[in-house]
Amino acid sequence: MRARHTWPAALAVAAALALTGCSADSSDDQAATSSAGGAPAAEKAAEPGTADRGGPAAADTAAKAPNLQVDQRSIIYTGSITLRVKDVNQDAARVLAIASGAGGFVGSDKRSSGDTTDAAEATIELRVPADKFQSVVDQIAGLGEEEQRSVNTQDVTEEVLDLGARIASQQARVDSGRRLLAQAKNLEDLVMLESELAKREADLASLQAKQKRLADLTALSTITVVLLDPGAPGAPAGDDEPTFLSGLAAGWDALVASLRVLLTIVGALLPWLIALGLPLLLTLWLIRRLRRTPAHPAPQVAPATYGPPAPPVSAPPASPKE
């Protein structure tokens, strides 16, 4: 009876162990299958086509692409503004203060003080940060009566990117030349490599200078400010119809301008005419004087005559007509 009850228990234990082993094998197979399939999955994720699905590769690819949004583009801003102000010197000082407050500086400052004939005028060139360009122009416009404003932009993003790529390529060529120069074994190779390396370094320096110039133009904008005195001539308010008096005034101005130009040319040529013309005229006068002086003729001796002179021979009388 004890043997009969033992066999069913042993069979149950063996069946349980068999089932446990099968489940372990199946789990191991699944783990192996998943690990084996992980490599192709990773390879597929690394393919270029999978970058569009929003995986990590897509994030890396997007990070390497250049950002060409409006706020990331390289733009050169240049502008000019003409104002009519009450006091040129005081308002010029205010313009300088506005530029200094925006983090800029003065590129040039030309002023003419007014007198009885001319009115005061100032031309100031400012360099201000590009992000403060519009605000500085608006602040300057509030100093007086605005007569003219001009704003120009130049997009040099593609040129900047191309220049950066060329600099990287040229830097690699310079590094390669330096490595080859370090490995030179004879004098001929050394001289040739030094010449080639100097040429590559000169090209690299030229590209870097262009890059620095573009960086300066894009980082700092240029604003030309013209300040006019109330009595200074400016642009006409409207297009007036031409009249006789306006035409006469224009003709007189043209005549005066032409005479000024003519007198300027004569004044410039007069020293040359004196230095070269007087010796030439003196030489011509001497040549004509020598030509007009007659040569002394040789004395003529009359032939000797002996006896009385011969009577003159008279013409025979004319015969009468029949």
Image (tube, rainbow, N blue to C red):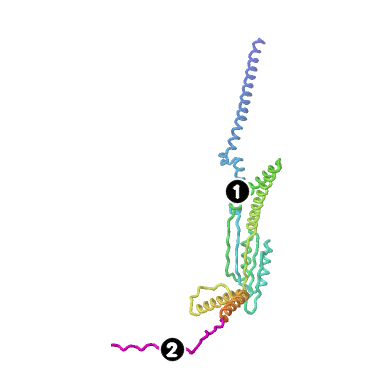
**Which dot marks residue 302?**
none
Magenta stretch: give its range. Answer: 297-322
Q: Residue at x 65, y 61 (%)?
A: 128
Say whether residue 161 is magenta. Answer: no
Q: Are there few (<14), some (14-19), or many (20+) residues within 10 Å of tag 1?
A: few
* Residue located beneath label 2 in the image: 312
Name the foreground residue: 122 vs 189.
189
Q: Residue furthest left?
A: 322
Q: Which residue is mark 1?
A: 66
The residue carrying pointer 2 sits among few (fewer than 14), some (14 to 19) or many (20 or more) residues within 10 Å by Cα, namely few
Note whether 113 is above or below 166 in the view shown: below
Question: Foreground residue, 55 or 149?
Answer: 149
Viewer-proximal residue, 154 or 51? 154
x, y percent for residue 242:
48, 76
Asked if the stretch drawn in magenta spans residue 307, the answer is: yes
Image x and y of residue 6, in percent: 66, 13
